[in-house]
Image (spheres, rainbow, N blue to C red):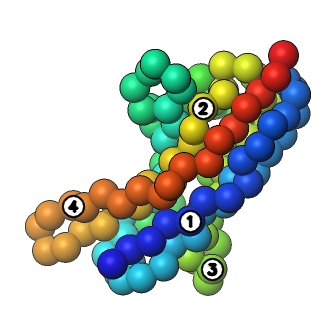
Amino acid sequence: QVQLVESGGGLVQAGGSLRLSCVASGNIFGTTAMGWYRQAPGKQRELVAVLTSGGSTNYADSVKGRFTISRDNAKNTVYLQMNSLKPEDTAVYYCNLKLRRIVDIYDFWGQGTQVTVSS
């Protein structure tokens, strides 16, 4: 079983910074990517940033130049450094891990961490 535990959310003023962390545990052999998604009230969950096992990254247009995804393989941890935060970044942020088992891809999710940006 795979477990993802996020931390680092909170309340910050516009223009401020936060760093989210996500620690993965369990049988994560076969991980193809880890990333962050977010869901604001009344909206669908959306991709924020993803980091593949090969080191490629992809960011939502709305966060490019402000957010940076990185990882520490020794700690099985992925980070999301969020700078120049805006009120529209307010959402619950979820860690995601994609894992390949033979030909199938499985998605695992953390419990979410609230990020609130005040204007």
Residue 84, above or below 58:
above
The answer to whether residue 49 is seen in the rendering is no
Q: Which mark is residue 105?
A: 4
The 10 Å Cα crowd at callout 3, few under 14, some 14 to 19, many 20 or more, is few
- Residue 101: percent from left, percent from top: 19, 73
Binning the other alpha carbons within 10 Å of mark 4 as few (below 14), some (14 to 19) or many (20 upward) gives few
Please give the label number shown on residue 75.
Answer: 3
Residue for badge 1: 5
Q: Mark 4 or mark 3, which is nearer the start of the sequence?
A: 3
Left or right: 100 in relation to 66: left
Q: Name the residue type under label 2.
A: Ala
Q: Earlier in the sequence, mark 1 or mark 4?
A: 1
**Residue kind at label 1, given as amino acid type:** Val
- Mark 3–mark 4 CB contact (< 8 Å): no
Mark 3 vs mark 1, CA separation in Å = 13 Å
Label pair 1/2, CB-CB below 8 angstroms: no
